[in-house]
Image (cartoon, helix red, strand yellow):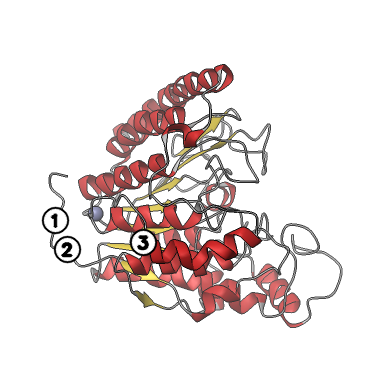
């Protein structure tokens, strides 16, 4: 890619012993088993974790969370039994012993990675355990306790930098949007399955930002059944003009793997091939507009053998400015084959990219959804660009 330095330092990989302590128990879909498959695949590509997440301080968490909420998380952390409150309890986000420390460490991982980028130690950082984008100022939601992308963004805002946040998870990035709703210095762009059919039920085109920040919150809500063609086109239509209009000084991205066709919890039909293409698009935008400053996080993703590791590999390769590999390490595939079978996620694909449409038949309804994605992206772009231009003119 023109203008991309090829001799830059490797991206900072954020992972450590605390990463796997963020664990809601063996029956929960957001399983720390994803680190076994995911980090070991990154290691076959030469990645070495250099930053082990440690808890953010209370004062740091209070940039984006209510003190009373942090106190509630700590109470559950010491004593997980008790009636539900603050979004914590039986269901999506159950209490577990040590949940404050584990959650604060996820937040701390993204925060320290952002600080390394702001100091100029690295251009790019990748925190696969981050991306907990549903957490709200005063409540947990959707497997998310503390909102690490929102915290990293808040840190960049302390330095006065404009931040573009790109959320590729299949679910709307509602927590990040809510926390930075009224800040015109934070452009959030979330593409997701429509809230009509999927949690959290928000993320519609008319959510454009609070007073004084209109146009800086952008939502591309896709119909269920949209595939890689519509997903990629929508993002290629929307992201470059939005970045050009907003001129970010830092880019933060969330690479939830749950838009994939194999994901059990949602209804888009995206491929790893498409997710890799988007990771490289984000890299290009970071270099073009933000001097390369780019923090990537993981996110959702519930097929932890066939999908999540390959999506993380694509993000890592994009951050390393390396050409995507073809075949995965056979030793890696062998290592996880039995595990994948046990969890009903076999066979593990042997190549990084998927066949077209993930090998599924291309239906008429999918073709319709793909065409609709283009219309939806053009509509939200048509709303946002004049608002961003008007802001500039003031
Ligand atoms: Zn780059």
Total number of numbered discs in the rendering: 3
Q: Position of residue 44 (x, y in %)?
A: 34, 67
Residue 329 badge: 3
Q: Position of residue 380 (x, y in %)?
A: 46, 27
Query: Marks 3 and 1, Cα distance to the nearest angstrom?
Result: 27 Å
* Secondary structure of residue under mark 1: loop
| Residue drawn where x is 55% and y is 47% of the image | 258
Dot 1 and dot 2 residues touching (CB under 8 Å): yes
Q: Is residue 294 visible?
A: yes
Going from the N terminus, do you reach mark 2 or mark 3 first?
2
Disc 2 crowd rating (10 Å Cα; few below 14, some 14-19, many 20+) is few
The one of 305 and 141 positioned closer to us in this rendering: 305
Q: Position of residue 64 (x, y in %)?
A: 55, 62
The one of 119 and 26 positioned closer to us in this rendering: 26
Disc 3 crowd rating (10 Å Cα; few below 14, some 14-19, many 20+) is some
Note whether ligand 1 is within 8 Å of mark 2.
yes
The residue beneath circle 1 is 5
Q: Position of residue 245 (x, y in %)?
A: 30, 35
The residue beneath circle 2 is 8
């Amino acid at each position: 890619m023109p203008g991309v330095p090829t001799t830059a330092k490797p991206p900072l990989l954020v992972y450590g012993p605390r990463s796997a302590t963020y664990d809601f128990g063996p029956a929960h879909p957001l399983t720390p088993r994803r680190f076994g498959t995911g980090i070991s695949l990154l290691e076959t590509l030469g990645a070495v974790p250099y930053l082990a997440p440690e808890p953010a301080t209370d004062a740091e968490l209070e940039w984006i969370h209510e003190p009373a909420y942090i106190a509630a998380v700590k109470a559950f952390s010491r004593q997980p039994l008790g009636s539900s409150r603050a979004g914590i309890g039986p269901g999506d986000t159950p209490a577990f012993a040590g949940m404050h420390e584990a959650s604060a460490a996820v937040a701390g991982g993204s925060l320290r990675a952002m600080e390394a980028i702001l100091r100029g130690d690295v251009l790019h950082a990748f925190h696969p355990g981050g991306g907990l984008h549903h957490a709200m100022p005063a409540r947990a939601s959707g497997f998310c306790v503390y909102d690490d992308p929102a915290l990293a963004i808040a840190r960049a805002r302390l330095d006065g930098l404009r931040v573009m946040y790109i959320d590729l998870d299949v679910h709307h990035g509602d927590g990040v949007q809510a926390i930075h709703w009224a800040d015109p210095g934070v452009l959030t762009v979330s593409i997701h399955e429509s809230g009509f059919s999927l949690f959290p039920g928000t993320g519609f085109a008319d959510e454009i930002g609070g007073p004084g920040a209109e146009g800086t919150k952008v939502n591309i809500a896709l119909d269920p059944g949209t595939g890689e063609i519509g997903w990629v086109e929508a993002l290629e239509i929307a992201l470059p003009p939005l970045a050009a209009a907003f001129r970010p000084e830092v880019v933060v991205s969330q690479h939830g793997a749950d838009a994939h066709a194999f994901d059990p919890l949602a209804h888009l039909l995206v491929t790893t091939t498409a997710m890799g293409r988007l990771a490289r698009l984000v890299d290009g935008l970071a270099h073009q507009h933000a001097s390369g400053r780019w923090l990537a996080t993981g996110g959702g993703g519930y097929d932890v053998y066939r999908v999540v590791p390959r999506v993380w590999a694509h993000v890592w390769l994009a951050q390393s400015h390396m050409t995507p590999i073809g075949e995965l390490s056979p030793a890696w595939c062998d290592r996880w084959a039995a595990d994948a079978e046990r969890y009903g996620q076999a066979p593990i694909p042997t190549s990084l990219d998927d066949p077209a449409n993930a090998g599924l038949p291309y239906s008429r309804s999918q073709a319709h959804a793909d065409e609709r994605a283009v219309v939806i992206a053009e509509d939200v772009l048509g709303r946002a660009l004049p608002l961003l231009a008007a802001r500039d003119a003031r």
